[in-house]
Amino acid sequence: MNNLDYWFEVTPGNGTTGAIITDPISIGSCPPCEPAVIAQSSADPVPYCGEGVNLEVEASGTLPDYAWYRPDSTLLSWLPEVYAQYEAPGQYTVVVSNACGADTAQVNAVVDSNLCVPVLIDSAWFTPWNWGIYSGVQFHQTSVGSCPQYEWTMPWGETLFTDVLHQLNVPNPTEGDYTLVASNACGSDTLVLHVVPPEPCEGPILGNATITAANLCETGTAVFDVPVSGPGPITTRWYNPEGQLITGSSHFTIPYAPWGTYTFVASNYCRADTITVFHGPADTTGLYTCQPPQLLGLSAIPVACYNDTVNIVASVALSGPCATLVWSNVQVLSTSGDTVVARLTSDQPPMLTATNACGQVVAEAPMELIFPVTYDRNLCRVSEPISLDSLLAPYGMPYSGGQWQLAGVDHGLFYDPALDTSGIYQYMVDTNGVYCSVVDFGLHEFPGVYAGEDSSVTVCSSDPPFALFNLLGGQPETGGSWRFGLLAASSIFDPAVNTPGAYMYSIQTLGSGGGCYDFAFVTVAVDTASTWYADADGDGLGDAADTLLACAQPSGFVSTADDGCPQVFGTVGDPCDDGDANTINDTLGVDCVCAGEPGSGIAETDQANMGVWPNPNSGDQFYLQTPGGTGKVAVAVTDATGRLVLQANIVASSAPALIDLPPGLVAGNYFVRVETERIVAVRRLVVVR
């Protein structure tokens, strides 16, 4: 295997993967690597049957890996040569790769019709067949040719196909000729096999066949029933008027049974018997003798308004069974002879449909119907008269020269909130001598609502939840609802949980929706809180164990958390005063106790020039500023017990010297002793981890 990344998957399909933890091979001698290059790839033609591919690839390169992929991109094989007996034709992809490169090629496996051999039936026969309470015969056949398909046609006309084993089980076969057709894409062959049932033989006995429906003038649910007796087992079949098989039961119900002649067939080993039943109107004689409806005349006034009551005269020749006369687009109020009094209830002219068992005729009354366009508008906070035309202007006003009406009474052009009420205001226009409403304008006056004024606020992520309503400007009315985008939102905003953005408050006159409407936005921005550390001793350094989340710096808290001595001013390594005049270099130790070093008594005044930093120290290196002068300097570092941990000799200069500490020093107090020809100086070095 190549020195690449490999992965394994647990429970295929769930996408749970992990890297193989073995490191790539990093030892040994690897030969030079030549990238993989495909020299040749091919696919043999797929046989006529449409299954089976033979794929091959040749490639050069160092230790190549092979991968063949199906047309749907799933993996087929890891081998350079692949014979897949049941694969379909299509475009296959091969990838050849190694540690230093990869190459890809695609080949097409196509169906070759020249590989098809015409089918030729060799023989056909049948054997007895039993399965539980069922019995019959099983048909068999043999043939030569490519991928044959077999179908048998029964003596009663039904055609059945063989199963995957090329066998066909037929219960209760009747005597007669059974026709076998074997075929493929390049030919077919036919054989007739005569089947004689055993003797003596008695066929099925059929009673009266019935089809019962609740209303024979309407196509709907019907119950089919035929009593069947005789030696069994017996096979039964119902066929619809088009000759299609419905069911194998002698008694059944279907929800929709079209009119026509239905056929019932019952068969056993001996023979088949057939009975036909007509399903249709009760007056079957009239069905064949009646004439389809005829419309002799249809008249009405030429122009009418929506909702008008009109007289329509219709002369229809309608006889025979199941005769019906139906009016559409109107409400029929009364009928007298050929005259119908009806109210126009649609935007379409009246329509008459005459139907009987043998036909139907449909006609539309020759009249122009004036149907108004309808608009609705809510009026909010209207205090002065306003033009009806201006209220309708946003919708467009294609009419002119008309008159506004309210409840059938002429109305002026202006709507006056002090006098007028909500209602349907109609714009009446004279159309060919007929005064009709062309616009029905519904005006609905409601008291106004107020959602307040837009506002914005910036809060901290550590702030407590607060009510959005309290941030709205003005004096908003209560009872509204909040949304964030397209989703309903809570009226309480929690900076730690909720998404910042624009929250909309909306309110309507009617709680169920409708009436006047108003909305306002509260835009919330959230600043991320920082961690602050308590500074109890006021030294500007914080205690990592005592924190507070806030966006602005709270009193008594700082942003740094490196106070090693929270209750003592300063931190570990800072200078201090231990109150002892005989010590020098007083420093806070890791125990937060101020302690100094004993004085050497030798040139104490020159020791001020000596420095050690950084202090506290990580324990790796420190800088040493020698006390002054020139010459050799002896440096010794001891721990708190006096054990020598470092000894070195350097040459004094004005530049600080970098001293490497021994690795692995534990945290604690150490003492750096510097000795020159003139002085001896000691400094404490605090090592922290």
Image: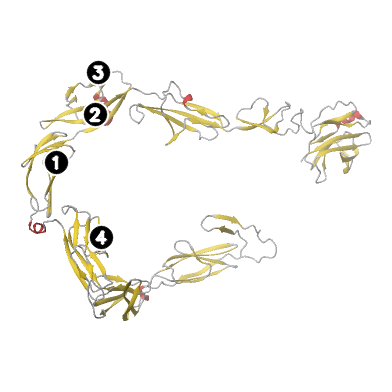
First-in-chain label (2 vs 1): 1
Residue behind mark 4: 252
Per the model, the C-alpha gap separating discs 4 and 1 is: 42 Å
- Say whether residue 433 is left or right of residue 587: left
Residue type indicated by callout 3: Leu
Residue type indicated by callout 1: Pro
Tell me where residue 648 sits by quadrant. Answer: top right
Residue behind mark 1: 350
* Residue sitting at the far bottom: 122
Residue drawn at x 83%, y 27% is 577
First-in-chain label (3 vs 2): 3
* Quadrant in which the N terminus appears: bottom right
Tell me where residue 276 sits by quadrant. Answer: bottom left
First-in-chain label (4 vs 3): 4
* Tag nearer the camera, 2 or 1: 1
* Residue 561 image position (x, y, % from top left): 70, 33
Residue type indicated by callout 2: Phe
Q: Is residue 492 above or below residue 5?
A: above
